[in-house]
Image (cartoon, rainbow, N blue to C red):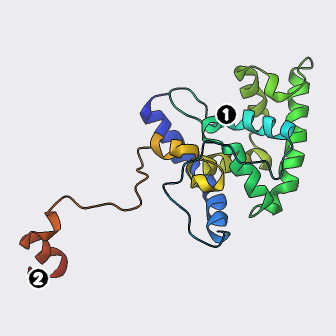
Amino acid sequence: MSDLSRRHFVEQLGALSAVWLLALSTERESGTHDHAHRTSQPPRLRFFDRAQAAEIEAAAERIVPSDDGPGAREANAVYFIDGGLATFAKDQQKLFVDGLRALASAARERYPQAERFSALSAAQQDEVLRAIEKTPFFEALRGATIAGMFALPSYGGNRDYVGWTAVGMSTDPVFAPPFGHYDQPAVRRKLLGRSDP
């Protein structure tokens, strides 16, 4: 996938994650979040069991694949989704549990020999996901996956800021202007209406 098509993909799907990111912003834990925090250990699962998490991770990986750069797997999107379902998105728990059953059923219907969705090849997984892409579960999963790519790492996803890095976003919490630019009299007059300090 080219940088342009990846950017277009993110732009098209980014809106779907707005609900998750908005809910996330209203459920912040007390205290401050360290924007420079990087984690090497994945968080623990809070809602899914290991088998469910493997299925969600496989589906998320097909939504944002690891082709020419990090995808949902490298971003730990499954942990963001899991944490969301345990906290700010509790109202979607049934949707995800039922959706996982529907995903397994769609996989078995197309590939009876497969034990689970995550055991299918990438092409087979894509076929199964296309079969359910109009469902509320898939819409929720897609939005949550995108949110998991770009949320603060302290919420479980975007591990080591791989999502931000993929779209060229800096992790610096403070941005310094070019040295001396805003001190120039013409710029000060334009911004402040005066050039004196």
Q: Residue at x 67, y 65 (%)?
A: 23
Q: Assign a secondary structure to mark 2.
A: loop
Q: Is residue 99 left or right of residue 62?
A: right
The reply to whether the C-beta atoms of the residues labelled 2 and 1 are less than 8 Å apart is no
Is residue 4 or residue 184 the one in the foreground?
184
Image coords of residue 92 (percent x, y): 81, 57
For the residue marked with disc 1, what is the amino acid?
Glu
Residue 126 lies in quadrant: top right
Image coords of residue 138 (percent x, y): 75, 44
Can you see residue 139?
Answer: no
Q: Residue at x 74, y 64 (%)?
A: 88
- From the viewer's perspective, is residue 114 above or below residue 169? above
Separation of marks 2 and 1 at Cα, in angstroms: 54 Å
Residue 4 lies in quadrant: top left
Image coords of residue 147 (percent x, y): 62, 51
Q: Residue at x 43, y 33 (%)?
A: 3
Residue most extreme to the top: 113
Q: Is residue 197 left or right of residue 51?
A: left
Q: Quadrant of the C terminus?
A: bottom left
Work out whether mark 2 precedes mark 1 in sequence or the reverse, and give the earlier one: 1
Q: Assign a secondary structure to mark 1.
A: helix
Is residue 6 or residue 29 the one in the foreground?
29
Name the residue that disc number 2 marks.
194
- From the viewer's perspective, is residue 24 above or below residue 67? below
Name the residue that disc number 1 marks.
61
How packed mark 2 is, by other alpha carbons closer than 10 Å (few <14, some 14-19, many 20 or more), is: few
